[in-house]
Amino acid sequence: MKLSSYFLPVLKESPSEAEIVSHKLMLRAGMISQSSSGIYSWLPLGLKVLKKIENIVREEQNSAGVNEILMSTIQPADLWKESGRYEDYGKEMLRIQDRQERSMLYGPTNEEQVTDIFRRSIKSYKELPQLLYHIQWKFRDELRPRFGVMRGREFLMKDAYSFDLDLENSERSYNKFFVCYLKTFERLGLKAIPMAADTGPIGGDMSHEFVIISNTGESDIYFDKNILNQGEKISEINYEDDLSALVQNFKNYYSASDEKFNQKEFDKNVKKELQMTSKGIEVGHIFSFGTKYSESMKANVLDSNGKEGPVYMGSYGIGISRLVGAIIEYSHDESGIVWPLEVAPFQIGLVNVKSNDEKAKKVADEIYQSISSQNIDILYDDKSDNAGVKFSRMDLIGLPFQVIVGNKAISDNLVEVKNRKTGETSEIKIDNISDRIKELIF
Ligand code: 5CA
């Protein structure tokens, strides 16, 4: 992509409405544009990151054997009246009347809708377990939308649902998602800590939040320092294996967010020197709620003795749009964003500092051609701005590596490669640049 034909409305100053660094940087880097309070449009740079995160989440759900579906954003109120949550959900739910005066709503979550899909076709234990997920926009009329995409009213969520014959099998599904979440967040370059959590309006009696440490997080978190060192080989896990020991190992370490925190328990279970307290951002939340929805909505299955009973369920959420902000909170410096390679909107930023010089232009054009032909995402700053503007813009948008074509390209056939995170630079012969880039990226 050439910057001269890209829509990248960067801002010099931080907009006054933004309180936290990720919100400021997302606005400054031209990633999002506010539509109304807590509702955003995604501009090219932001959308690219959102899609990259979405794809990593999708790949990990698929590799755990979860089936992707896509449920509608608008749901009939009748389903929610069946479960009893239509009234309970209160003012957070956006209620809509269609032209026939039927009550509809914009989905804040999908337990009812997926239970309806399930009960229409699955009737026997032989067809269990069923694991389904979708990635869809949600609407919650939050009382205090704030911090940009971190607490929005409209936000993108991956929500998955499990259906099992009994509690034991349901726990197996829960463990699968638990492990899948650890893998997913690791791939996103994040250390997410699983914590015992409150179930809130989703309900049930077992729940874990996945929280990353950040000064700007909305929850206070308390945990045993040792939990940070668990799950080292998580990427090699086989989902067919028994995962209960691995999950139990995590549960053995004290970790809780404010709602579940208990000082006495903390002191009893964790030595003083291992007690950690911080702020955290909740990036995922998993729930096991047994028959809460299946009983009220009559989603029954037959067991091997021909006896009918309600199916056991769980639900599993990841805040995809929140993750864009959370990753920035986790990874930035005073010059701007520092994207982890896996989610970077472009892997390489190519800057031609001498845009008026013919040789420099030829060199930069050729590097651009050769790198883009290798399936590497590259953003080429071919604009005529001065070097200072170009450098600060490139640092602001945080691409992992910069290739800089300057004076030495003209005199000595050398270009500079800069690592955005460490700031390290090296000079590379123009002829070797393609190979060097491949080494850095693959
Ligand atoms: N049905 C369940 C799980 S599928 C559910 O809705 N869980 S939740 O309410 O905890 O939301 C799941 C995830 O969505 C949260 O962990 C959080 O990362 C994200 N999320 C929730 N509310 C918002 C919001 N207002 N803005 C951005 N992300 C949000």
Image (cartoon, rainbow, N blue to C red):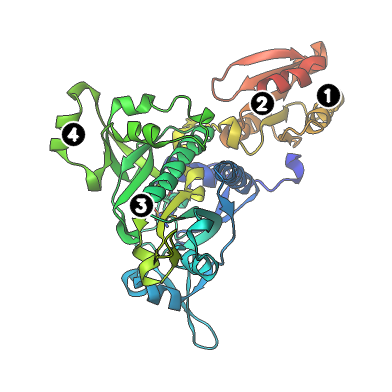
- Residue type at mark 2 is Gln
* Picture residue at 33% right of the left edge, 61% below the top: 201
Disc nearer the start of the sequence (4/1): 4
Distance, label 1 to label 3, CA atoms, is 64 Å
Provide residue 335's location: percent of width, then percent of height.
Answer: 52, 31
Disc nearer the start of the sequence (2/1): 1
Mark 1 lies on residue: 363
Mark 2 lies on residue: 402
- Residue type at mark 4 is Phe
Distance, label 4 to label 1, CA atoms, is 61 Å
Under tag 4, what secondary structure? helix
Under tag 2, what secondary structure? strand
Mark 3 lies on residue: 167
* Picture residue at 53% right of the left edge, 60% below the top: 137
Tell us which disc is closer to us: 4 or 1: 4
For this orientation, the residue located farthest to the top is: 412
For this orientation, the residue located farthest to the bottom is: 100
Under tag 1, what secondary structure? helix
Dot 1 alpha-carbon crowd within 10 angstroms: few under 14, some 14 to 19, many 20 or more = many
